[in-house]
Image (cartoon, rainbow, N blue to C red):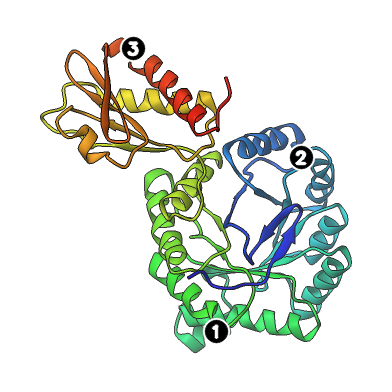
């Protein structure tokens, strides 16, 4: 059962409550480069990103955020470190949410000024605690950057904000270590009513970063913890969205389009299955499918329909022909060079039947 949390609005997106787990990312362009930043936000949106965070390292970036706000419908989150005045300026420039790290914002009074400004504009704050920014006092108390240290660091700021009547709070407790991240979120989840932003900080590049993020985020989501997620990967942030969508879909929490099922191949495989899978992925992207269709791509006709019985539609490959099957049953044989064309046609027919596709 999913943990109950307060519902907060970030622009047009609801985080927490009964809302679906939302997907975030962060631009890696220079925020003051309006053309590059807007282009990247557009690509993130097209990929399925629902909230975008931007680094605001100086006044020029905060003012640029105000301009960017005018040209994108996606909620914008200002990422602030060290200078609370940048948070105030970002809020005035139209930020839909502000992420601050209490460990480097400059003390409780400055945090209070940010909260007051956020309350005036009706936007939430994310209290983002990282294992690398835990205070020296808490490191000594807990003998390092432990889950308990992360939780106490966050609770101190939350308690201060609550005592000053501010409760539009989102909380994150990120570490580079997967077990530490999981332990911290598990410990705090029962102590506060606020939405939790999940992620593994500085997870790395490519498959390794995706694995670390999937382990931590997936474990927590499957245990009912988490309201919004960001997969942190080195490189193009659009890749973060692909991984985040796959995590949510694999966890059964959201249906975000087709799911491809493909076998790992063996000695029975007589076709170039990897290329075929890539062709199907390209086809799905071209068709802009949103229906949660299960498409199976199997390397041989021996186990294809049987192993992919739950698929809506699929392909089994053989040396000189392909087999199209629907709902686990053989449907027709096709020539190898016709597989993708026939598959596209049959997907359209299937979706028409489901009243999801119009010719």
Q: Earlier in the sequence, mark 3 or mark 1?
A: 1
Residue closest to the far left: 267
Give the crowd class for mark 3: few <14, some 14-19, many >=20 residues within 10 Å.
few
Q: Is residue 60 above or below residue 265?
A: below
Nearest the eye: 336 or 189? 336
Residue 143 visible in this rendered orientation of the protein: yes
Q: Position of residue 191 (x, y in %)?
A: 57, 83
Q: Nearer the viewer, mark 3 or mark 1?
A: 3
Nearest the eye: 281 or 331? 331
Identify which residue is drawn at 47% across, 76% down.
186
User: Disc 2 marks which residue?
Assistant: 72
- Quarter containing the C terminus: top right
Q: Secondary structure at mark 1?
A: helix
| Separation of marks 3 and 2 at Cα, in angstroms | 41 Å
User: Disc 1 marks which residue?
Assistant: 138
Q: Secondary structure at mark 3?
A: helix
Identify which residue is drawn at 44% across, 18% down.
345
In the rendered structure, the answer to whether residue 108 lies left or right of residue 268 reads right
Identify which residue is drawn at 55% across, 28% down.
357
Give the crowd class for mark 2: few <14, some 14-19, many >=20 residues within 10 Å.
few
Nearest the eye: 346 or 43? 346
User: Disc 3 marks which residue?
Assistant: 338
């Amino acid at each position: 059962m999913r943990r109950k949390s307060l519902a907060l609005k970030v622009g047009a997106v609801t985080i927490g409550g009964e809302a679906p787990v939302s997907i975030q990312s962060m631009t890696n362009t220079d925020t003051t480069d309006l053309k590059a930043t807007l282009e990247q936000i557009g690509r993130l949106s097209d990929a399925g990103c629902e909230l975008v965070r931007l680094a605001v390292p100086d006044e020029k970036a905060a003012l640029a955020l105000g301009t960017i706000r005018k040209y994108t419908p996606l909620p914008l989150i200002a990422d602030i470190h060290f200078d609370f005045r940048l948070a105030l300026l970002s809020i005035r420039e139209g930020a839909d949410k502000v992420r601050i790290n209490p460990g480097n914002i400059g003390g409780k009074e400055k945090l209070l000024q940010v909260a007051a400004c956020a309350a005036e504009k009706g936007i939430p704050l994310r209290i983002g605690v990282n294992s690398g920014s835990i205070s020296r006092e808490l490191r000594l108390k807990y003998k390092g950057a432990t889950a308990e240290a992360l939780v106490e660091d966050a609770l101190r700021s939350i308690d201060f904000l609550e005592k000053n009547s501010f409760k539009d709070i989102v909380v994150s407790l990120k570490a580079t270590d997967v077990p530490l991240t999981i332990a911290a979120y598990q410990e705090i989840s029962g102590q506060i009513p606020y939405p939790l932003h999940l992620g593994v900080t500085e997870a790395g590049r490519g498959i390794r970063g995706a694995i670390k993020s999937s382990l931590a985020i997936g474990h927590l989501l499957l245990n009912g913890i988490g309201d919004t997620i960001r997969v942190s990967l080195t490189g193009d942030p659009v890749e973060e969205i692909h991984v985040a969508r796959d995590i949510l879909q694999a966890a059964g929490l959201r249906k975000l389009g087709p799911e491809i099922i493909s076998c790992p191949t063996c000695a029975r495989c007589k076709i170039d299955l990897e290329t075929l899978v890539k062709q199907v992925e390209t086809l799905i992207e071209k068709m802009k499918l949103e229906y949660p269709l299960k498409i199976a791509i199997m390397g041989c006709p021996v186990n294809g329909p049987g192993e992919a019985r739950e698929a809506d539609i699929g392909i089994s490959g053989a040396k000189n022909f392909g087999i199209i099957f629907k709902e686990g049953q053989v449907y027709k044989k096709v020539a190898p060079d016709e597989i993708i064309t026939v598959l596209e046609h049959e997907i359209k027919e299937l979706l028409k039947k489901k009243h999801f596709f119009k010719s």
